[in-house]
Image (cartoon, grey):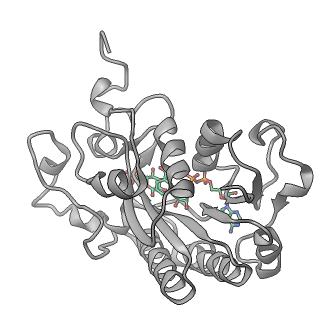
């Protein structure tokens, strides 16, 4: 990818995990509605390439996508408890605004931060907590219909569908990454569900790097590390994107400490 890459939501947790891993490998344009701290901006990114703006502001987004070859769209309300007015504006309208501007500006590819909560309601009372455990084989692979666990999940499934439309209608390559649970340094502590869907910082950066480099049309993949117990398959991400995760929550205790000798 020789052209600049627009990263929305650059100041957040996922944005910083990506920039922490591959910040020196691309010409970035960074967008966030909050000012970015100096230490959150990779060396070499000029002030002109740091846009303080809202993803629902059509004019700001059109300016931000102008001249970029790819977009990683993260900005939005990440709270599983977020109310409808917030996810409607920040997540659904925001995704539409970004995809629409990308199409008009000839952007080749968009990687979209979807979520485990787009399919969270597969975790039924009958299946849980067994499905979080090593001796259970239940797995989702990304081809299943959305089954959101909350309104936030509805907004993420909507983003995936908006991406589908912009792929079919405008030919943009779209990768929807259903991110699991990103935590730095160790899996979520004392949380079985979170440990099965842990995404380490380095695997997160590598996965989005693959979204910027691989050839694909429209994809939905799961963004988790290579955890021993996973109820999300990462086969599709491996096959299509060349994702090769290095981390595994089984190398940590339930309390989140590295196991001896690992
Ligand atoms: N952190 C995680 O484990 C997961 C995150 N995700 C998704 O990844 C994306 C990023 O999440 P995080 O980094 O964890 O959240 P975060 O809250 O740490 O970062 C989000 C960033 O987006 C910005 N933002 C929010 N609304 C905006 C708007 N309307 N216009 C411009 N900027 C806006 C915020 O200022 C913030 O810097 C979200 O879309 C979230 O739904 C999905 C699954 C798991
Ligand atoms: O989509 C998201 O999912 C993760 C994991 O969900 P949780 O309900 O197990 O905490 C969440 O931490 C993150 O904030 C959210 O954006």
Above or below, 46 against 106 in this view is above
Residue 148 picture location, percent across and down: 34, 71
Q: Quadrant of the C terminus?
A: top left
Residue 208 picture location, percent across and down: 53, 51
Above or below, 106 against 1 in this view is below
For the point 83% across and 61% down, which residue is it? 52
Looking at the image, which is closer to me, 202 or 192?
202
Residue 93 picture location, percent across and down: 62, 81
In the image: residue 170, left or right of residue 193: right
Total count of labels: 0
Looking at the image, which is closer to me, 92 or 233?
233
**Residue 16 image-quadrant placement:** top right
For the point 8% across and 41% down, which residue is it? 135
**Residue 75 image-quadrant placement:** bottom right
Outermost residue on the right side: it is 47
Residue 202 picture location, percent across and down: 51, 36
Looking at the image, which is closer to me, 102 or 85?
102
């Amino acid at each position: 990818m020789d052209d600049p890459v627009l990263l929305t939501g650059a100041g957040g947790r996922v944005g910083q995990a990506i920039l922490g891993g591959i910040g020196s490998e691309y010409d970035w344009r960074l967008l966030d509605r909050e000012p970015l701290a100096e230490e959150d901006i990779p060396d070499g990114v000029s002030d002109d390439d740091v846009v303080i703006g809202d993803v629902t502001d059509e004019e700001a987004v059109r300016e931000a996508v102008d001249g970029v070859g790819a977009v990683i769209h993260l900005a939005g309300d990440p709270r599983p408890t977020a109310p409808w007015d917030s996810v409607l504006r920040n997540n659904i309208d925001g995704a539409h605004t970004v995809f629409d501007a990308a199409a008009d500006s000839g952007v080749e590819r968009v990687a979209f931060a979807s979520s485990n909560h787009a399919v969270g309601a597969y975790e039924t009372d009958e299946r849980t907590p067994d499905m979080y455990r090593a001796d259970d084989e239940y797995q989702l692979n990304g081809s299943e219909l959305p089954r959101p666990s909350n309104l936030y999940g509805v907004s993420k499934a909507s983003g995936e569908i908006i991406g589908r439309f912009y792929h079919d209608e405008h030919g943009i390559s779209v990768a929807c990454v259903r991110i699991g649970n990103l935590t730095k340094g160790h899996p979520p502590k004392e949380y079985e569900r979170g440990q099965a869907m842990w995404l380490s910082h380095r695997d997160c950066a590598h996965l989005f790097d693959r979204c910027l480099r691989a050839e694909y049309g429209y994809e939905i993949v799961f963004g988790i590390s290579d955890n021993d117990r996973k109820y999300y398959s990462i086969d599709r991400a491996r096959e299509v994107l060349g994702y090769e995760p290095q981390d595994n929550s089984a190398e940590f205790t339930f309390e989140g400490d590295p196991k001896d000798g690992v």
